[in-house]
Image (cartoon, rainbow, N blue to C red):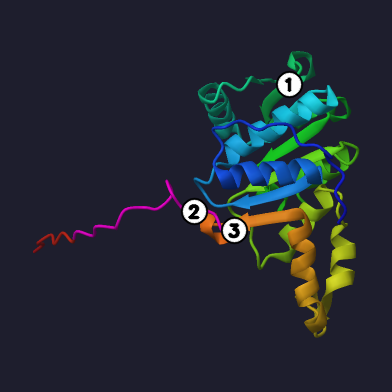
Amino acid sequence: DPMTGLADVPGLPSFLFPHQRDIVAWALRRGRAAIFAGTGLGKTAMELVWADAVAGHTGRPVLIFAPLAVSQQHIREAEKFNLPARIVRNQSEVSAGVNVTNYQKIGHFDLRAFGGVVLDESSILKATDGHYRTRLIGECSGIPFRLAATATPAPNDFMELGNHAEFLGVMSYTDMLATFFTHDGGDTQKWRLKGHAENEFWKWMASWAVMLRQPSDLGYPNDGYDLPPLNQTQHRVAVD
């Protein structure tokens, strides 16, 4: 999938880890990208930096959708890193720069006014007939910059991967099935990768999505992410 984003990426904040900085720069060059990064790898910081850069480039506000309980976390992260961001409840509260809201308020915004949109916990796109999935894909189709981020994509759930591709404008879910998959026997609800298309499918995925569980998955040091040894203590409780 061709890149449609920034030809020249601006300088990115020094607080980003090396893997975060490179992923944000790649996502900005792509314009429409997915970040499938494990818990604790800094998706919130990457989303905020990406959104801030897109707002500066387009001169239009950027909207981050997040689950209700997560919206305030974005604001705390933004304050920690001295990045301007605000919680908004409707279009009248939107200002230049980065705006954060929850998915339940999607009907209170005119998404055509935004230069970019971010889906935090983007596995909300999982269900093909889901209300938010259908609305987000339809109303975001004209937004030039789109970012989807989640720690829990299902690599064996091709429906979810196809919905991400469709949200990002890479390829529709049905076109993905027709290109890379075949019916498994007579059951039209079960799809499997065509044998000769497996490598091409994952190469295509890697053109618009990045996935990692730890920085070393992509060749970066795990400094700061290496957990101490796990201490297990067994407690035996006596019962009658």
Rendered image: mark on residue 221 = 2
Q: Is 210 or 162 nearer to us in this picture?
A: 210
Residue type, numbered disc 1: Gly
Q: Is residue 200 above or below residue 41?
A: below
Q: State whether residue 146 is above or below residue 151.
A: above
Q: Where residue 198 sits: x, y (%)?
A: 76, 76
Residue 126 lies, with reference to residue 64, above or below; the image says: below
In percent of width and height, residue 157 lies at: 68, 65
Q: Are marks 1 and 2 in contact (CB under 8 Å)?
A: no
Q: Quadrant of residue 50?
A: top right
Amino acid type shown at disc 3: Leu
Nearer-the-camera pick, 17 or 173: 17
> Earlier along the polypeptide chain: callout 1 or callout 2?
1
* Residue 128 rendering spot, x and y as whole percentages: 78, 56
Tell me the tag on residue 97.
Answer: 1
Q: Which label sits in the foreground, 1 or 2? A: 2
At 89% from the left and 70% from the top, the residue drawn is 178
What type is the residue that disc 2 sits on? Pro
Mark positioned earlier in the residue sequence (3 or 1): 1
Decide if residue 142 is on the left or right side of residue 50: right
Residue positioned 81% across, 42% down in the render? 31
Q: Is disc 3 placed on a helix, strand or loop?
A: helix
Direction bottom: furthest residue: 185
User: Which residue matches tag 3?
Assistant: 218
Rounded to the nearest angstrom, the CA distance separating label 3 from label 1 is 31 Å
For the magenta stretch, what is the residue range? 219-233
